[in-house]
Image (spheres, rainbow, N blue to C red):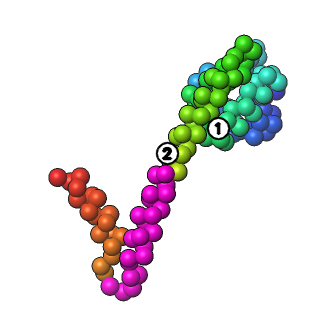
Amino acid sequence: MNIGDVARRSGLPAKTIRYYEEIGLVEPLRGPNGYRRFRESDLHKLAFLGRARSLGFSLEDCRSLLALYEDRTRASADVKKIAQDHIARIERKMDELRQMHETLSHLVEKCAGDHRPDCPILADLAAEADCCAK
């Protein structure tokens, strides 16, 4: 398969596929003309990577998961640990987003949203900027 075929079948853009090759996640064969020749196994890896990335795994997590997937002597505990660590990162990010939501909601509630120039939202943003200017 050429890169267009594998892009269509995997659902990944050709640019992403070339990047994954560049960083060593996939290693397609090269024809005599220098063009990439993807095997079914490459397509499977790309689909695997696409799914893992859609779940938010980092590229390094993907590299580790792919290595574990290909290692038939792997311990499922190793896979579970990567997933648990990722869940912990997601939960931290969710907490940060909740805090951002609460702060912004509070500021929006305090803003009159009328013709006057005073605005608690801008005042809060300026207060954060002022602390760093010193």
Q: Is there CB contact under 8 Å for labels 2 and 1? A: no
Say which residue appears at 31% left-offset and 66% top-offset: 124
Q: Work out whether residue 21 or residue 93 is closer to the camera in this orientation and state it.
A: 93
Say which residue appears at 69% left-offset and 32% top-offset: 49
Q: Position of residue 20 (x, y in %)?
A: 63, 28
Q: Work out whether residue 23 or residue 70 is closer to the camera in this orientation and state it.
A: 70
Residue range (magenta): 95-116
Q: Specify the farthest residue to the bottom.
A: 115
Q: Quadrant of residue 3?
A: top right
Assess disc 2: are there few (<14), some (14-19) or many (≥20) residues with their C-alpha within 10 Å of its C-alpha. few
Tag 1's secondary structure?
helix
Query: Which dot, 2 or 1, sits closer to the camera?
Result: 2
Horizontal relation, residue 60 to residue 44: left or right: left
85 in relation to 21, above or below:
below
Q: Work out whether residue 85 or residue 56 is closer to the camera in this orientation and state it.
A: 85
Tag 2's secondary structure?
helix
Q: Which mark is residue 9?
A: none
Horizontal relation, residue 97 to residue 46: left or right: left
Q: Position of residue 69 (x, y in %)?
A: 72, 22
Q: Specify the farthest residue to the left.
A: 134
Q: Identify the image quadrant of the N terminus.
A: top right
Residue highlighted by disc 2? 92
User: Is tag 2's residue or tag 1's residue first in the polypeptide sequence?
Assistant: 1
Residue at mark 2 to residue at mark 1: CA–CA distance:
18 Å
Q: Quadrant of residue 74?
A: top right
Give the mark count: 2
Q: Position of residue 107 (x, y in %)?
A: 39, 70
Assess disc 1: are there few (<14), some (14-19) or many (≥20) residues with their C-alpha within 10 Å of its C-alpha. some
Badge 1 amino acid: Arg
Residue highlighted by disc 1? 53
Is 18 contained in the magenta span?
no
